[in-house]
Structures are given as C-alpha cells and as structure tokens.
Image: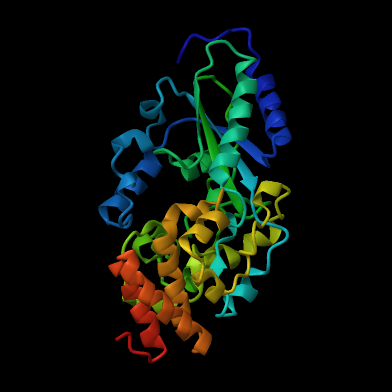
Amino acid sequence: MASLSSNVDYERLLQSIMDWASELGFQQLGVSNIELSKHEAHLNNWLAAGFHGEMDYMQKHGSKRSHPEELVDDTYRVISVRMDYMPPDCELSDAVLADPSLGFISRYALGRDYHKVMRKRLQKLADKINGQTDAFNYRVFVDSAPVLEKALAEKSGLGWIGKHSNIINQKAGSWFFLGEIYTNIPLPLTSSQANGHCGTCTTCIDICPTKAIVAPYKVDARRCISYLTIELHGSIPIKFRKDIGNRIYGCDDCQLCCPWNRFSQPTLEQDFFTRHPLDAPDLVELFNWSEEEFLKQTEGSAIRRIGYERWQRNISIALGNAPTSEKIVQALKKRKDETDKMNSIMLAEHIDWALEQHCISSE
C-alpha cells in the first residue's frame, strides 16, 4: 500500500463517500478487502467445466480476475456500488412474454447503456475522493475488465450471490447494476450478507426455460438464453430455439420469479427509463428494420453491441415460435431473399428454421 496521510479519518471519509454516492444516484455503497480465494476456486471449477462457452475473456487474464492487486497495482480495498435499473414506465414483463407477437428485451437494456452512465458517475465519485486524500491511486470499472464484481459486491455487503448467480439484496431484490473502484486507501470494511437468504427456494432453477441453472449457484452459460442471444456469435443450437420463445435480447425469468424482488423499487434514474418502444415491440416491425434503422434505434443502447445480424437471428427464432400468420411468413420470406445480399449463411439458416416451423419450405 502506498504511503498515505496518517491524519485522515477514514471512518469519516467513508461516510462522506457514502453521502457522495447517494447524491450521484447510487442506492448503496460498500467496501471489501481483496481476498477472493473462495470465489477463485468457484471460478476455476466453472471454467474447467466449460460453462463459459465462447466467453474466452473469462479465462484469458489468468489470475487477475480473482487477484485485484494484479490488475491494478497497490489495490488494497474495493469500493462497490449498486444502481437500480428497472424502468417505472415499461410494460409488465409477464404480459410481453405471454404475447408471442411481441419481442421481449431484458429490462436492463431498455434505457441508455449502463456502462457509460455508471462509469461517469463512478469517475465523479473518484474525483471527490481524490480531493480528500494524498497519494490516492484508483481505477474505475463497470463490467469492462477482469473483475469478479458479484463476489466483491457480496463481500462488501451489497447482497448475496443467489442460486441463479445474480446478486440479491434483502431490501432491494436484484434489479440493479454494479460498479467498482479499486483503490489503495485503507477504508473501513462494510458488513456482508454473504451467508445468503435463498433458503430452500429453487424457483429460479425450476423456471429456467433452458435448464441453464444446472445446480444451485452454478449456471451453464452455454444453455442460458442471455448468453445465447447476446454473447454467442454464431448459430444458436436448434435444441434451445423453442425454449427461447419470444426472448430476443437476454432473459429475466430467474429474476422475475425471485421472491426477493417484491422488495425492489423502480429506478429514479431517467437514463434507464424506456427509450423507443422497446418494452413491448412488435416482432415483425423489428424484423423489418434495415441496418440503418437498427443503428439509429439502438444508439446509446447496450443492444447495439450484438450487431444487426445477431439481432435478426434472434428475431427469426421468435418469429418461428409465434403462431403462423401471413404477416410473419411474408416478413421471413422477404428477409430470406435479402440475406443473399448480406452474404449471411448464419442468418439464412435461422430464417429457414423459422419458416419450417410454419410448414413453409425455404426453397
């Protein structure tokens, strides 16, 4: 740890940091040490089982993910924050999922890209801290580097890792984003909820459409709809396509069913309010977007990261799962004709599958 001023009252500084965090729109802040051996063992076992699928970034950084001091020199403490994101103005998720003519988008992606929003706020928080200490060394993270954010959040007292592998807070559920500041200042540690409060409940395991939660606290990403629709670059395995239903970007099922989310609160952060009519969009209308329309409608959104081809791939599956109609069949045929120009074998294959679900030959 770098040489720091001995006359700093770190208890008082922590209280100031918590106050600043609240002013910046964070709902909670906690501080943890960097001892992650238990979580490191869990990560290594998860990787060894191949549960990360094509997410090679989960293992390419070696031990930096579980040893913060290797990622940022002189790291001694990690400040973790959470920010609620459930939009107060969106259609009820259950209603959208029950209507196969609509597309379901994970509720975290309905507003502005959280990476940008959270990073700016965390940087402002770091700037305030920097004005109060000497030799302050830090780095800000928002789901953007090899960081075990859930483990650190759990250690800092923001919640516990549930059986679905998401962080749950006893008073706020799980609809929130996480962010971190790695720092060298010796802040007091905050209390932890590490023992968890899931009890005997297995609702998230039972309800998962693709049975991706293969055991409590263990998710096989290769089966997870969020992975399949967002992280996977190529063809979605046929065995999962029916189970995907009308989920075209992510999946919230394991959070929607969690009893603790009865305590969650809608976000007050306007950047996370629904942008464009994406909370209950018509599938055919989305499928008819040109690439230019896709880029325009998803500007500033996390959705844009999957690109137009995967967006079309996901909607093709949802259209294949919808009841047969002339509108759907014509949209699929029209797009199939256009895939030759796009030179997308992968997309053409998904459209063919969708047409087959409506007993229409792709020939």
Front-lying residue, 236 or 219: 236
Q: Is residue 307 visible?
A: yes
Residue 238, quarter of picture: bottom left
User: Hey, which residue is sitting farthest bottom in the picture?
Assistant: 359
Tell me the colour scheme of the image.
Answer: rainbow
Q: Is residue 253 above or below residue 17?
A: below
Residue 219, quarter of picture: bottom left
Left or right: 193, with 66 as reference point: right
Picture coordinates of residue 314, whole percent (x, y) = 43, 68
Picture coordinates of residue 263, whole percent (x, y) = 70, 57
Q: Is residue 202 visible?
A: no
Which residue is depicted at the point 64% across and 15% down? 131
Left or right: 81, with 45 as reference point: right
Q: Looking at the figure, which quarter contains the N terminus?
A: top left
Which residue is depicted at the point 50% across and 71% down? 288
Q: Is residue 341 above or below residue 158?
A: below
Picture coordinates of residue 221, whole percent (x, y) = 37, 60
Which residue is depicted at the point 40% across and 58% down? 218
Front-lying residue, 103 or 7: 103
Front-lying residue, 253 or 357: 357
Picture coordinates of residue 36, whole percent (x, y) = 41, 37
Left or right: 70, with 102 as reference point: left
Front-lying residue, 157 or 113: 113
User: Hey, which residue is sitting farthest front in the picture?
Assistant: 341
The total number of labels drawn is: 0
Q: Is residue 67 above or below residue 44?
A: above
Q: Looking at the figure, which quarter contains the C terminus?
A: bottom left
